[in-house]
Image: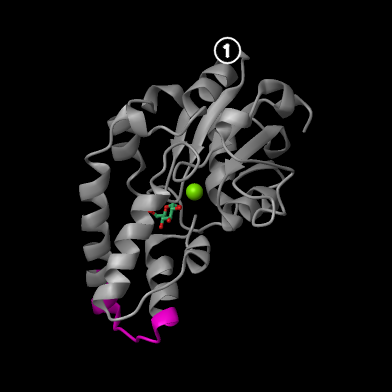
Amino acid sequence: DIKACIFDLDGVIVDTAVYHYKAWKRLANELGFDFTEEQNEQLKGVSRVRSLQLILGWGGVTKTEAEQTELATRKNDWYVDMINQMTPAEILPGALDFLEACRAAGLKTALGSASKNSMTILNKVGIAHLFDTIVDGNHVSAPKPDPEVFLKGAEALGVSPTECVVFEDAIAGVQAAKNGGMKAVGIGSPETLSQADLVVSGLDKMTIEKLKEL
Ligand code: G6P
Ligand code: MG
């Protein structure tokens, strides 16, 4: 039986994926190159440092570790400027309703995000109270597709991995859920998220009934 839902943040609850993309694109452009939206898919769910390394690789650019730290900080400063402007209006369609429906159905809820900025975002959009536990980039050492972030969430909720459903927009995130022995609902396109047990275009298309059928 499903006892808990674990939600990724960026691209599932809020559309911060767009802000990450804008900030990385700006950085790449300053370094003299660009990358495609298709390449951007590979950055979803991927840590800040690893994302930078992938982008530098695409541009054929080599940077020292100190330079990489500076570049990652520059990107994050732009990103933080954008998320500091966020309002509850930026919660993705259906996310609030589905979170509340889960809680009303007696299911536990957790956040499982690679982001170190997740508390800022949750507070800005006013939904931190809807999660029984929050596990993010400040608490984990192994990045998705390692299941650490979701396993820590399950542990904090006192449920077993097989009793959890993970909601993810990232290929690496869906893989992390499956690697952890959990059910995965992909948020996005079925072509991209083919490893998920179910794919919906957004949480507005998700119901407790569909959850029970997984
Ligand atoms: C999420 C996003 C990634 C982002 C990562 C780290 O997983 O999907 O695009 O790189 O979090 O976010 P942060 O806010 O710590 O840079
Ligand atoms: Mg995401």
- From the top left corner, tell me how far across and down residue 48 is, in percent: 38, 61
Residue 177 colored in magenta in the image = no
Q: Name the amino acid, label 1.
A: Ala
Rendered image quadrant of residue 69: bottom left
Q: To which residue does mark 1 refer?
A: 104
**Vertical placement of residue 173 versus 150, above or below:** below
- How far from the left and from the top, in percent, is residue 62? 34, 86
Image point (22%, 71%), residue name: 70
Task: Estimate the x, y position of residue 211 in percent, counting from the top left.
Answer: 71, 28
Instruction: Give above or below for 7 relative to 80.
Output: above
| Residue shown at the point (62%, 30%) measured from the top left | 205
* 61 part of magenta stretch: yes
Quadrant occupied by the N terminus? top right
Q: Pinpoint residue 192: horizontal percent, then vertical percent.
A: 64, 57
Q: Quadrant of residue 191?
A: bottom right
Q: Which residues are magenta?
A: 57-69
Give the main secondary structure, helix, strand or loop, of the magenta stretch: helix
Single out the residue that lies furthest toward the top.
Answer: 104
**Of residues 35 and 208, the one drawn nearer to the viewer in this rendering:** 35
Q: Which corner quadrant of the image does residue 134 belong to?
A: top left
